[in-house]
Amino acid sequence: MESPGPGEASGLRAQPAPRLYGTAPSEASPEPQEPGGARSVPRCRAYGAVAVLCYINLLNYMHWFIIPGVLLDIQKHFGLNDLEAGLLQTVFISGLLLAAPLFGYLGDRYSRKVTLSVGVILWSSGSLSGSFLPGRDSWLFFLSRGVVGVGVASYSTIAPTIIGDLFVKDQRTRMLSLFYIFIPVGSGLGYVLGSAVTKATGDWHWAFRIMPCLEAVALVLLVLLVPDPPLGGAEEQSEAGGPRTSWCEDVRYLGKNWSFVWSTLGVTAMAFVMGALGFWVPKFLYYTRVLHGLQPSCDSPDSLIFGALTVVTGIVGVLVGAEIARRYKKLTPTAEPLVCAGSMLAAAPCLYLAIILAQRTILAAYVFLTLGEVLLSFNWAIVTDILLSVVMPSRRGTAEALQITVGHILGDAGSPYLIGQVSSVLQAAHGDSSLWLFRSLQYSFFICIFVDVLGGACFLMTALHMERGLPPAPAIEESWEHRG
């Protein structure tokens, strides 16, 4: 966009049309004066901030999946069965979802950088303290996982909104894609770190003691390099100086925004499936090897293999999904939810074949599991882009918090526990033979396929409501009336 001439910077400049939050972004949306991001933040600093946020997101998601990487060792150390092991992830997610609304409220009203710093300190302290607990104090280990979840809540809620306030349109989509690549990369490295460090040291505790060193570096970079841009700072109609609404008013606004509601339900289904698979697949693959006589010992390589698989499929999935959505958006404004729906519906048969064929050949299980993970990873960046498109800037922190809270309450907070409970019941009914250790998890995974299809339907409903559109948010209407 060319800079205006001296005489064009006056009040004679044409006023752009107001943005209708609750609909997909239109091509008529105004461009920022600086194409790299918010007017008050230099482009180089904006890109540097994204690099730091990506690094912290990597560490963030390594915490999510470092437990599954050493699950067998943790179960042995604390004497946990499958049901209790699944509860570990539930406690972690419960801490996250209880804290997310608070951090969303703070992020919309106070310094986001300070809030993020507190979160990093919390999750680092919780992880480190949990590594020094003896086997008899399993309840304290559960508590430490809850503290880690509380710290993670601040980052998952606020970090995407900072990127949303630094960039717009295609640049925002690309930056969010880069940011969300580090979800599967961090998840995969969590498995890898847990397995590799345990193998190198002979002690799973060291996997939790390395992370605080990396997070100390992250905290310094966050304080020094990440700006705290005004809400809506990258958009023409920034609301930084607009009237402040109460939290209850924000929630009522979001409850009437059906694009947001249906996309949140779709995210919930995705979280359910990814949470259950991420927690239990390494152990399922271990039981598969035992069934085939390939892995008689507890020194299973599957956490390492599945971690590497998660990294590769995540990178490919996020990049391909974002690019398809970006190109398809030129044809229809509902491209993003349609891509999400299509990827989830296509992932269901892939996951079904992976689960069914595992009993015959482990290679087929890996092939179809890879395809399913690639398709599910399409949505990581797209779902946040949907939220930023349909929610007004001053309510995005609250919207992120509510989406995270609902997604985790009904999604991955309970799915590992549910799968573990069903597996334990089936094992109790049929005995602990190698066949039923395998089948108990195999049958439990069918729940994920059903939920996956429901998630695809929710994204189809998101597309329907984005097409219909919603009236402009009241604060936006008021600000444009003052301009006229």
Image: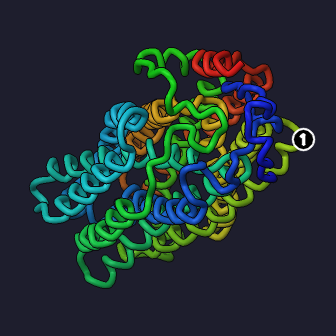
Q: Is residue 328 left or right of residue 270?
A: right
Describe residue 427's horizontal placement relative to residue 305 as left or right: left
Q: Where does the C terminus fall, quadrant-wise?
A: top right
In terms of depth relative to the viewer, which is nearer, 410 or 177? 177
Residue 158: x and y in percent read 44, 44
Q: Which residue is mark 1?
A: 331
Structural crowding at the residue carrying mark 1, measured as other residues with C-alpha within 10 Å and reported as few (<14), some (14–19) or many (≥20): few
Please tell me which residue is depicted at 32% across the width and 36% down the height of the picture.
99
Would residue 398 appear left or right of 87 to someone viewing this image?
A: right
Pick out the residue farthest to the bottom.
200
The image position of residue 317, as x and y in percent, is: 68, 59
Colour scheme of this structure image? rainbow
Asked which secondary structure carries label 1, the reply is loop
Image quarter for residue 136?
bottom left
The image shows residue 229 at horizontal and vertical percentages of 49, 46
- The residue positioned 70% from the left and 28% from the top of the image is 462
Question: Residue visible at 60% across and 15% down?
Answer: 474
Q: Residue at x 80, y 52 (%)?
A: 1
Count of numbered circles in the view: 1
